[in-house]
């Protein structure tokens, strides 16, 4: 401070001269000049408050002012800030309304812990909302709404109130998702009504397990009553889809800061102005995951239920806290809404080169969409969910959801560095003192995950949109070790493999599991599609043909034998292969055709040992190789049986070509 240049003012200073009785200099405890006779520290001006609470109140500055009213366009343009807050609470109360009592809860903004006194209803100021209500215990209380909190606020909520929430050494929020550490596709239910009856894919092979409207309402009421019984709920109002013309407004009501921060990261975050004009959401999720469904309710086969009602534009979650259910639940909604607008929804990663060449990465869970689309030399458009419209590609989400098991700084530096303040780290194990995460540890689950905003990746392309794809890369993690590291596909082959949606991972960590298990999931995401797979396939074929995209099949799985004798393809080699696809090098390479699958494989790829390009070279036991190849071919054939009677697109010709593009033996 300018007025006090003396660095030692008022300090405890050994005095000079005048020795004391025992010869030591006398300790002078006073400021030399002045001499008021009072010892005080005036190194800084005193705070001008009376109590510690007042002091704390100085710490917090009011959030940045909302946008000036004269600049605001939209529904709430003519309202004051107070009126807008009231409108927001009214809209949230309507979301949370009980359908039988036909009333919404009484709402108040903010953390209940910060508001020691019960709000007085009579002179309710703007930040309370009291609807008219019928008498019931839940209508006598207030529900506090924590609306679009910031990551810092959500960290505090999680750490204070949610067991298992900790800050890791890199600043991420470690959380536990509870008993469920992965999605529960068998517990998904979709309301079958007059409309969805005809529109959706039902029956054998379909992920849409039916429920009726009434049962949905029973579960909805259960979730809403649970949420209303709480002292506080979190509400996120956010967007899906970076294509502004096809943006969807979503509201997520949840009971955990973990869920709110997860969705903050994974959906598109509205600006302050966009939030002011948010209005009514297009779709609402009620996440009551801590509370089970009632097993006596019709259609329920466990205490977990994830229920989608397209007519009401609502989703209810009971009995699972795994946050991926919300992300993938909304993806299902997009798989319904977008094709209606002639837009193809895709379970794929997407990135773009410096020259604007876009690549899509399809693949089932764990095959490399996030790992390979996060590429230091390319712009990341998104890692998991996209739309392909007449204008090009757009990411549906605002964040990434990376697998963390065995994560290393060397192999995946961009993902490693994204795990910092704001990132949700699910179910990882860490040192209790240093808080260093051990990414090798599978004690809680093998499916450890990091959810971070896409801008945590340094070369993210914001807004997350791009031109039409040039390359369509189908990823398979073939634990049988017989698919080539890379093959160039014809359009019919691309469609065959897209509809098949193959991968084979090792069954997990259990002792004695030696056999890989083949998984076929149509469109590389049968768990999320709402229409018959051939609908999406036909759209993909049309778009690829129109825009001249090339299809590729890349095996990110085993080489040199099946799981057990061979080993996983080196990530460095897979990256070289992907580089060669992007650069165009592989388009003009020399090719030969493989047996059984009839795949075109290059004889050379820069940076990759040529002998591994044909898997047969890497197997020491050639007989075992042939047997395994035929076995996998047979599994493909069996799987495709259900599709042989379906026409793909308007053209019978394409259907015949696709059927002929599978394994031949
Ligand atoms: N050759 C390889 N190519 C790609 N990934 C590899 C390879 N070898 C090992 N891996 C590992 O495999 C995993 C791929 O997982 P990734 O998160 O990319 O899956 P995903 O396709 O995005 O799945 P999800 O849809 O579940 O998010 C990563 O843990 C990565 O480190
Ligand atoms: O949804 C999840 O839990 C993870 C994921 O991305 C997938 O399985 O495709
Ligand atoms: Ca992923
Ligand atoms: Mn995914």
Image (cartoon, rainbow, N blue to C red):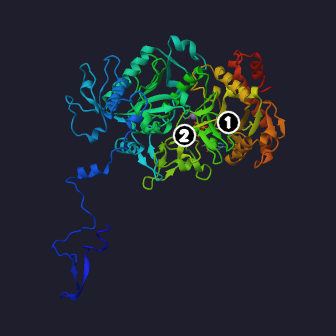
Quarter in which the C terminus is drawn = top right
Rendering coords of residue 10 (x, y %)? 24, 73
Check the image and report above or below for 35 versus 367. Answer: below
> Which structural element holds mark 1?
strand
Rendering coords of residue 114 (x, y %)? 27, 42
Q: Which residue matches tag 1?
A: 475
Q: Quadrant of residue 655?
A: top right
**The residue positioned farthest toward the front in the image shown:** 70
* Identity of the residue drawn at 17% across and 88% down: 21
Give me the disc on residue 233.
none
Q: Give the CA distance from mark 2 to mark 1.
A: 18 Å
Give me the disc on residue 400.
2
Rendering coords of residue 353 (x, y %)? 67, 43
Q: Nearer the viewer, residue 55 or 365?
A: 55
Q: Quadrant of residue 284?
A: top left
Ligand 3 quadrant assignment: top right
Check the image and report above or below for 115 versus 7. Answer: above
Rendering coords of residue 111 (x, y %)? 31, 39
Sequence-wise, the earlier of marks 2 and 1 is 2
Q: Is mark 2 within 8 Å of ligand 3?
A: yes
Q: How many marks?
A: 2
Q: Is mark 1 within 8 Å of ligand 1?
A: yes
* Identity of the residue drawn at 60% across and 48% down: 412
Q: Is residue 515 visible?
A: no
Q: Name the mark nearer the viewer: 2 or 1.
A: 2
């Amino acid at each position: 401070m300018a007025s006090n240049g003396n660095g030692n003012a008022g300090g405890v200073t050994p005095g000079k001269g005048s020795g004391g009785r025992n010869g030591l200099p006398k300790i002078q405890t006073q400021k030399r000049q002045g001499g008021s006779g009072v010892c005080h520290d005036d190194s800084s001006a005193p705070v001008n408050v009376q109590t510690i609470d007042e002091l704390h109140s100085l710490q917090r500055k009011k959030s940045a002012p909302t946008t000036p009213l004269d600049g605001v366009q939209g529904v709430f343009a003519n309202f004051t800030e107070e009126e807008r807050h009231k409108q927001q609470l009214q809209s949230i109360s309507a979301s949370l309304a009980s359908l039988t009592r036909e009333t919404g809860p009484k709402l108040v903004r903010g953390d209940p812990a910060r508001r020691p006194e019960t709000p007085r209803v009579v002179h309710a100021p703007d930040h309370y909302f009291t609807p008219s209500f019928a008498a019931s215990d839940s209508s006598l209380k207030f529900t506090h709404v924590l609306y679009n909190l910031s990551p810092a606020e959500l960290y505090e909520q999680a750490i204070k109130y949610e067991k298992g929430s900790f800050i890791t050494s890199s600043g991420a929020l470690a959380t536990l998702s509870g008993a469920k550490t992965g999605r529960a596709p068998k517990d998904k239910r979709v309301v079958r009504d007059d409309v969805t009856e005809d529109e959706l894919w039902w029956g054998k092979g379909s992920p849409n397990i039916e429920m009726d409207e009434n049962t949905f309402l029973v579960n909805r009421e259960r979730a809403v009553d649970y949420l209303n019984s709480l002292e506080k709920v979190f509400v996120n109002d956010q967007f899906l889809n970076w294509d502004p013309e096809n943006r969807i407004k979503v509201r997520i009501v949840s009971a955990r800061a973990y869920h709110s921060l997860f969705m903050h990261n994974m959906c598109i975050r509205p600006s302050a102005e966009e939030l002011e004009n948010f209005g009514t959401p297009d779709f609402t999720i009620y996440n009551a995951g801590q509370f089970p469904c009632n097993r006596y309710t019709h259609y329920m086969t466990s205490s977990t239920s994830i229920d989608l009602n397209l007519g009401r534009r609502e989703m209810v979650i009971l009995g699972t806290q795994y946050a991926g259910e919300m992300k993938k639940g909304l993806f299902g909604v997009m798989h319904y809404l977008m094709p209606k607008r002639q837009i193809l929804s895709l379970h794929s990663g997407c990135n773009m080169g410096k020259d604007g060449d876009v690549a899509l990465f399809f693949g089932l869970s764990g095959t490399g969409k996030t790992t390979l689309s996060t590429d230091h030399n390319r712009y990341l458009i998104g890692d998991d969910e996209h739309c392909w419209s007449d204008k090009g590609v757009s990411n549906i989400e605002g964040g990434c959801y990376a697998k963390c098991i065995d994560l290393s700084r060397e192999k995946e530096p961009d993902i490693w560095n994204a795990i910092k303040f704001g990132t949700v780290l699910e179910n990882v194990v860490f040192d209790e003192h240093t808080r260093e995460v051990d990414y090798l540890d599978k004690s809680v689950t093998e499916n450890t995950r990091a959810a971070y905003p896409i801008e945590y990746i340094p070369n993210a392309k914001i807004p997350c949109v791009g031109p039409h794809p040039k390359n369509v890369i189908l990823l398979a993690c073939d634990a049988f070790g017989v698919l080539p590291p890379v093959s160039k596909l014809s359009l019919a082959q691309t469609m065959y493999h897209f509809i098949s949606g193959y991968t084979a991972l090792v069954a997990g960590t259990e002792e004695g599991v030696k056999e890989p298990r083949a998984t076929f999931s149509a469109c590389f995401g049968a768990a999320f599609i709402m229409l018959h797979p051939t609908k999406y396939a036909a759209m993909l074929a049309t778009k690829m043909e129109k825009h001249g995209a090339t299809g590729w099949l890349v095996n990110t799985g085993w080489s040199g034998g099946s799981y057990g004798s061979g080993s996983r393809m080196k990530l460095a080699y897979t990256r070289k292969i992907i580089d060669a696809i992007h650069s165009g090098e592989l388009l003009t390479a020399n090719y030969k055709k493989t047996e059984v699958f009839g795949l075109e494989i290059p004889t050379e790829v820069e940076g990759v040992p040529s002998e591994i390009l044909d898997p047969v070279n890497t197997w020491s036991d050639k007989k075992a190789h042939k047997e395994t190849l035929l076995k996998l071919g047979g599994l493909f054939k069996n799987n495709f049986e259900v599709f042989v009677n379906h026409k793909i697109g308007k053209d019978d010709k394409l259907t015949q070509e696709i059927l002929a593009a599978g394994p031949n033996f």
